[in-house]
């Protein structure tokens, strides 16, 4: 028996590679849209996003799945990174850690993320995020490390921006 889902055309879903074109530099990608994430605000290394707790996001006990919460926090840090970097900069999460503090049973969760730059190599961004439930209760703390890709023309511009963010205003 096959586990493959069928597309509307009756063919198995395409497994990639995929080209994704976003409407704007700071916008949700297809995965974030699937989870119905909303970017509330993003500027100056900070981002606030929200996500509803839909039935499809439940784990076996009826709580919001930890992977959905982690995806929300990771996306919020990525959006905070984008608020600092030149359009088109390629970067990725290289490590993350989630600490789950309380279960989510209903409603909308909101995350506030901040990013700071590592002054050492000019390619590292450190993210922190706090996820709260609709009652303002902290349900998860999240930290991550993002790296800017080496081989791109905008790396020098990214280093300049990251230096400025960390207080190096130039000469």
Image: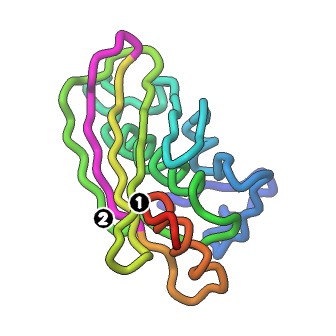
Please tell me whether residue 79 is drawn above or below residue 102 in the rendered image.
below
Disc number for residue 95: 2
Toward the front, the furthest residue is 171
Residue depicted at x 61% and y 75% = 157
Give 11 or 48, whichever is nearer the viewer: 48
Q: Mark 2 Cα within 10 Å, few/some/many (few <14, many 20+)?
A: few
Foreground residue among 129 and 38: 129
Residue 85 within the magenta-colored segment of the rendering: no
Segment tinted magenta in the rendering: 134-146
Q: Secondary structure at mark 1?
A: loop
**For residue 136, which quarter of the picture?**
top left
Please state which of the two labelled residues, at mark 2 or mark 1, is closer to the viewer.
1
Instruction: Give the colouring mode of the picture.
Output: rainbow
Question: For this view, does 83 lie left or right of residue 149?
Answer: right
Which residue position holds label 1? 166
Q: Along the horizontal axis of the image, is 68 left or right of 66?
A: right
Residue 163 against residue 141 in the figure, above or below = below
Which numbered disc covers residue 102?
none
Image point (43%, 76%), residue name:
122
Crowd tier of the residue under label 1, counting other residues whose Cα lies within 10 Å: few below 14, some 14–19, many 20 or above: few
Q: Is residue 79 above or below residue 134?
A: below
């Amino acid at each position: 028996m096959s586990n493959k889902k069928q597309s509307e055309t009756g063919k198995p879903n395409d497994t990639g590679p995929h080209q994704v074109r976003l409407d704007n530099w700071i916008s949700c990608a297809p995965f974030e849209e699937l989870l119905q994430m909303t970017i509330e605000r993003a500027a100056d290394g900070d981002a606030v996003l929200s996500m509803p707790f839909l039935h499809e996001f439940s784990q076996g006990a009826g709580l919001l799945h930890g992977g959905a919460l982690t995806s929300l926090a990771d996306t919020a840090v990525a959006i905070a990174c984008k608020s600092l970097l030149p359009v088109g900069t390629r970067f990725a999460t290289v490590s993350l850690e989630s600490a789950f503090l309380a279960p989510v049973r209903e409603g909308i969760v909101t995350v506030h993320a901040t990013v700071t730059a590592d002054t050492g190599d000019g390619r590292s961004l450190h993210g922190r995020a706090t996820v709260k439930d609709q009652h303002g209760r902290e349900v998860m703390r999240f930290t991550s490390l993002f790296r800017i890709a080496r081989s791109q023309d905008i790396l020098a511009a990214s280093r300049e921006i990251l230096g400025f963010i960390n207080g190096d205003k130039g000469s």
